Amino acid sequence: MAVPGSGRTFTVSVISPERKLFEGQATFVVVPAFDGELGILYGHAPLMALLGKGALRVETTAGTRRFRVSGGFVQVVDNEVSIASEQAEEA
């Protein structure tokens, strides 16, 4: 059985106060939300959530990008995921 949204891409941006760390297409994203990990696929319902501290994983067709984030928020709307973190760096 196929996973809903699997293989389809959506736009992701990861920003910190200092710079944009990533902007591109992804097939899956895992964010450390304030109350636990949150997985995002193509077609995810609109959402806003607070970020906690931990590992952010962005799966692309070219491989996996990993970041360490702390604080901020994630927004999902119309297959666009915006992750704005108070502190972020590539892991």
Image: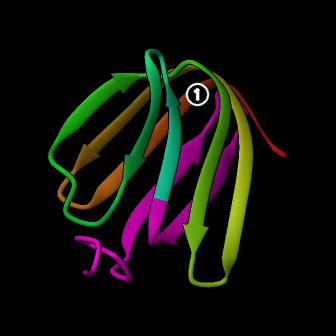
Q: Is residue 62 above or below residue 22?
A: below
Picture residue at 34% right of the left edge, 24% below the top: 49
Give x and y (percent) for residue 11. Answer: 39, 65
Range of magenta residues: 1-28
- The residue sitting at the front extreme is 1
Q: For the N terminus, which image quadrant?
A: bottom left
- Horizontal side of 72 relative to 88 (left or right) equals left
Picture residue at 36% right of the left edge, 52% below the top: 40
Element class at badge 1: strand
Q: Is residue 6 above or below residue 68?
A: below
The residue singled out by tag 1 in the image is 85
Q: Is residue 6 magenta?
A: yes
Q: Is residue 82 above or below residue 34?
A: below
Picture residue at 51% right of the left edge, 47% below the top: 30
Give x and y (percent) for residue 4. Answer: 22, 70
Question: Disc 1 marks which amino acid?
Answer: Ser
Q: Quadrant of residue 63?
A: bottom right
Give x and y (percent) for residue 22. Answer: 63, 57
Give x and y (percent) for residue 57. Answer: 62, 51
Q: Is residue 56 magenta?
A: no
Q: Dot 1: within a 10 Å radius of its alpha carbon, few (fewer than 14), some, or many (20 or more) residues?
A: many
- Horizontal side of 42 relative to 58 (left or right) equals left
Picture residue at 69% right of the left edge, 67% below the top: 64
Q: Quadrant of residue 9?
A: bottom left
- Count of marks, rendered view: 1
